[in-house]
Image (cartoon, grey):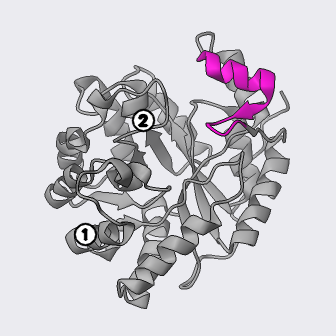
Amino acid sequence: MSAPLEVSPTNVRPTRPGDVVDAHVHLFSLPLFREFVEKTPDAPPRWRKAIEEGKWGRRNETLPDLDAGAMAEWYAARLDDAGVARAVVMSTMPDLQYVRDFIAASGGRVAALCNIDPRTPDAPELLEREMAAGFKGVKLYPVNRCFRLSDPACRPFFEKAAELGAAITVHYGVTVDPAGDLRYADPTDLSPVARDYPDLPFVIAHFGAGYLHEALRLCYQCKNVCLDSSGTNNWMDYDPHGYTLAQVFDRALTALGPERVLFGTDSGTTGRYRKWIAYQQMRILEEIGVLPGDRDLILRGNAVRIFRLDD
């Protein structure tokens, strides 16, 4: 593997009203998969298969075979085409130099959250190293990795996160991961953690991904918990309340206010950027009468504040 890239200073202008920040995207490539599998003897077979076939995802789409620098340029071009000023990548694999190099090469255009199992003894140390490498926080997958954030074993990790001011996005609810376990899907589990670390910002992805009511109750109790709108939100197909996406936005904005809802598309890198999701959600915000200043918070300002994108 080539020598690590040095973290570049931010070379993009600060965001301003009217810009769009996608607060939830993903990064997949063949070199990234190779690095993870090489250092992870028990990597899931489907990830090894992805390397063999060069394909990934439910649609079996082609994985880009780009080094970190080329990927950063390619990602920036995608954002330009979509009219997006910045984006925040949600890492799905831990401790990868490829993602660190991608952050450095992005020069501030694309930020990232690292991936860590908060139960492990070295989780605080790894988080400190990742934050020093340029990550803005961490993405946690309790449903996919089968753990509870309320587990006392996670407390040293949250102590370090609070010390470092790390932002934390959490995937609760349903998942396309075949290894996911819905026993860990309820956002209510975050309650004692968010309560005990009131200065830590938490973002629950995908409107709770089928656990909207539980997420809203948690957000009522803990003012440091936010929601993001990312993805197709096809969990609504299985929700007994028959919500439309406009109703979900309206309910979230009524309960939380515009300062705690973030826009995202959940776009990956094996398919086109999800411009249709961006268009749909922006149109909904207009149709339900969200004022321009509040739309700017949802589409830009909240992500900039929570993930410190203009720092």
Q: Quadrant of the C terminus?
A: bottom right
Mark 2, secondary structure of its residue: loop
**Which x, y percent locates residue 9?**
71, 60
Question: Counting residues from the N terminus, which is met first, the one under dot 2 or under dot 1?
Answer: 2
Q: Is residue 118 above or below residue 59?
A: above
Label 2 Cα neighbours within 10 Å, binned few <14 / some 14-19 / many ≥20:
many
Q: Nearer the viewer, residue 27 or 127?
A: 27
Q: Total number of numbered labels?
A: 2
- Between 117 and 130, the one lying in front of the other is 117
Residue on which disc 2 sits? 141
In the rendered structure, the answer to whether residue 43 lies left or right of residue 219 reads right
Which amino acid type is shown beneath numbered disc 2? Tyr
Q: Is residue 63 above or below residue 33?
A: below
Which of the image's four quarters has the N terminus? top right
**SS for callout 1:** helix
> Which residue lies at the image location 58% right of the left edge and 17% below the top edge?
44
Q: Which residue is mark 1?
A: 251
Question: Residue 84 versus residue 126: which sits nearer the camera?
Answer: 84
The residue that appears at 32% across and 59% down in the rendered structure is 226
Q: Residue 49: within the magenta?
A: yes
Q: Nearer the viewer, residue 133 or 309?
A: 309
Asked whether, in this view, residue 69 is left or right of residue 158, the answer is: right
Residue 283 place in picture, x, y as percent: 49, 80
Q: Residue 38: x and y, percent?
A: 72, 17
Question: Residue, x 63% and y 15% (percent of image)?
Answer: 45
Q: Amino acid at mark 1?
A: Arg
Where does the magenta region start and end?
44-60
Provide residue 172's location: percent of width, then percent of height. 35, 41
Quadrant for residue 8, please give it. bottom right
* Furthest residue in direction top, as rendered: 41
